[in-house]
Image: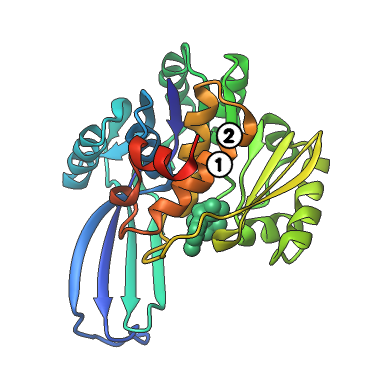
Amino acid sequence: TIVVFGSINMDLVVRTPRLPAPGETLTGHSFFTAPGGKGANQAVACARLDAPTRMVGRVGDDLFGEQLRHSLRSFGVQDDGVLTTPGPSGVALIAVDDAAENTIVIVPGANGAVGSEDMPRLERALDGARALLLQLETPLATVAAAARAGRARGATVILDPAPALPLPDELYALADILTPNESEATTLTGIPVHDEQSAAAAARALRARGARTVIIKLGARGALAADANGVRFWPAFTVTAVDTVAAGDAFNGGLAVALSEGRPFEEAIRWGLAAGALSVTKHGAQPSMPDRAELLALSGV
Ligand code: ADP
């Protein structure tokens, strides 16, 4: 199995002609809600590829909490590790204007309450798990505790340092694989990452802090990986992009599923690249995650 420990959010999305100025009231075009949160997105990415997947995290005792659980289950994610906690579920308030500019306010809600009481549930979920997926939308101390639990159980720990925050050295050492995108790699290292060369420099810097394997996701360019054997770049699959939301989450899902099936590292990277590419050909976060047949057709392995 794959265990995902992290955030579960409801995205509340408004389309508006332009973003409102402070104090201004505007009439928007449309409104919809969509399940999100990097943790839940990565769990859906894994489950869509037919991997037995357990989510560990929290939702609130509100309507969104019910809907978020139901949505996870409908994608095939086991939600017995999700605790319903008093108070609101995590939300992201997203406004998108006609020029595709956006503003986002995230309120962690139940995700912010994830803490040491969640560790026994995580440890139960980790029993027999091959991989543990982590991100940074729950409190940092909890992410470190989860990483420790994953390593103790022999799971491959894949840490997505998103959204980027300065990380304690301990967390680098606890990650088997660290998977920043360009902007996260830039924030973590201070090296402006915009091409293969700068990504290679950033990957080396992150390895020097203790991460064993670093994969930098380079959007439409592809991905670069650095480990003890050196640095290697893979170009992206060519697709027509319509919505790049959650491409990084799709990549991590593909990578984790391949590794949990015992596939070699290069093949796992191809799965990540293929999942990321397919996800940008569809709208939305979770509904854009490819299924196994689509992924096999594109990746060729
Ligand atoms: P994030 O969503 O975290 O910003 P990226 O934008 O780097 O992450 O996308 C993650 C991965 O998805 C990339 O490494 C790449 O493999 C794939 N991908 C993203 N955008 C495209 C694209 N336009 N064409 C093909 N593959 C893409």
Q: Is residue 40 left or right of residue 122?
A: left
Location of residue 176 in the rendering, given as x and y in whole percent from the top left corner: 66, 30
Q: Residues within 10 Å of mark 2 (few under 14, many from 20)?
A: some
Q: Which residue is mark 2?
A: 267
Q: Which residue is mark 1?
A: 270
Q: Residues within 10 Å of mark 1 (few under 14, many from 20)?
A: many
Location of residue 256 in the rendering, given as x and y in whole percent from the top left corner: 51, 32
- State which quadrant residue 12 falls in: bottom left
Q: Amino acid at mark 2?
A: Glu
> Residue at (23%, 85%) from the top-left corner?
26
> Residue at (71%, 37%) from the top-left corner?
213
Would residue 30 be seen by someone viewing this image from the given angle? yes
> Residue at (75%, 49%) from the top-left corner?
203
Q: CA distance from mark 2 to mark 1?
A: 5 Å
Q: Nearer the viewer, residue 105 or 175?
A: 175
Would residue 137 be seen by someone viewing this image from the given angle? no
- State which quadrant residue 215 falls in: top right
301 to 195, vertically: above or below: above
- Judged from the image, the secondary structure of the residue bearing numbered disc 1 is helix
103 to 189, vertically: above or below: below
Q: Amino acid at mark 1?
A: Arg
- Judged from the image, the secondary structure of the residue bearing numbered disc 2 is helix
Location of residue 282 in the rendering, given as x and y in whole percent from the top left corner: 32, 58
Location of residue 217 in the rendering, given as x and y in whole percent from the top left corner: 60, 53
Residues tagged 2 and 1 counted as in contact (Cβ below 8 A): yes
How was the colour assigned to the protein in this rendering?
Answer: rainbow
